[in-house]
Amino acid sequence: MSLKDEIKEVARNSGMQLCGFANIERFAESPPELHPTRVLPGCKTVIVIGVRLLDGVIQANFRDFEDGRTDLKGLYGTYAYTMLPNFQLTKACYDIAQYIEVHAEEVATPCSTGPMTNGRQVSMRHCAVAAGLGEFGWMSIVLTPEYGPRNRFGAILTTAEIEPDPLYSGEKLCHPEKCGICTKVCPSGALSAYGEKGKRAVHMEDRTFEYCTVDMVKCFVVEERLRKQYGAPEDYAPSDTPTREELEEAKRRASVSDLGLQHTPSWYCGRCLSYCPAGNWGKKFKSRGLSQGYRNDRFFKE
């Protein structure tokens, strides 16, 4: 069994559904501060693992979005955003790094996973695409053919030279020119609509991946519930477009959450991830009566 196959087996035994490999050349356009070699000099391979999000937890989002059950939002924060998937990924990254160093005698560095761990060394989204696990959706989240955007990823950097997987070349997963659901359900308009504003482009080998421009300030205002219209007890932020200083003041004023480990939650939204049709959305949610569809979200706008 090759080292690559052995690593895949370790990933499976650690509860991962996805595992892919990227060579360092695919990160040629990576921002210098997020390049894998800035973390591990001599890095030759980036191993990316992925875990699916539970359908039963995503449906808790629909209870919030469609039924007003805001008290259930902590389920998404605990089991799909902040805690469990990221802790599971952290342990799997550690297991794989240990295996490489013991059995291949190469250096391996597990990267941080999620908002409850220690910082951001590389872009997990770009790593997942570079490892062939999927493609960028218009909302900038990685879509996989198996689960759409409802995945979380972890990465291990290693000096071991392992054959890369091909970039994803299957059926196109995102059709922003005729879909646009992610932009329609974004409460603050943080996602640029297809064809209206600028877009981002990432080049890897002979492929170009495009996705929208995300106004992160507008996104923060919603996902951290900093205004009354998004569920806050008062308007901590004066508008959907606060200045950087106003945003920081709003975060300081926001009440401490008791719905998860984060004192300042960043998981109050998730509409683009939840309603994206990729990954058999209709079969998983609509046909089971778990969602009435994005038009029933209280912030939907035509």
Image: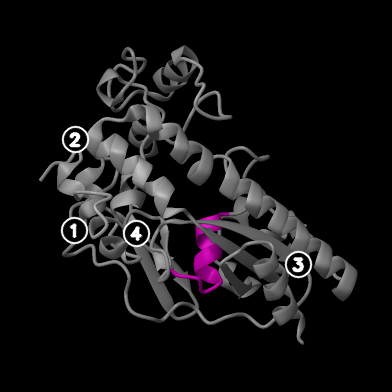
Residue occupied by mark 2 = 298
CA gap, disc 4 to disc 2? 25 Å
Q: Nearer the viewer, mark 4 or mark 2?
A: 2
Residue situated in front as seen by the camera: 242 or 14: 14
In the rendered image, the vertical position of residue 116 relative to residue 51, given as above or below: above
Residue occupied by mark 3 = 158
Classed neighbour count for the residue bearing mark 2: other residues with Cα under 10 Å, few (<14), some (14–19), many (≥20): some
Q: Which residues are magenta?
A: 123-134
Q: Amino acid at mark 3?
A: Thr
Q: Amino acid at mark 4?
A: Tyr
Q: In terms of secondary structure, where does tag 4 sit?
A: strand
Residue occupied by mark 4 = 211
Residue situated in front as seen by the camera: 232 or 58: 58
Q: Is residue 279 visible?
A: yes
Find residue 143 and report its horizontal and vertical position in percent.
40, 63
Find residue 288 and report its horizontal and vertical position in percent.
27, 57
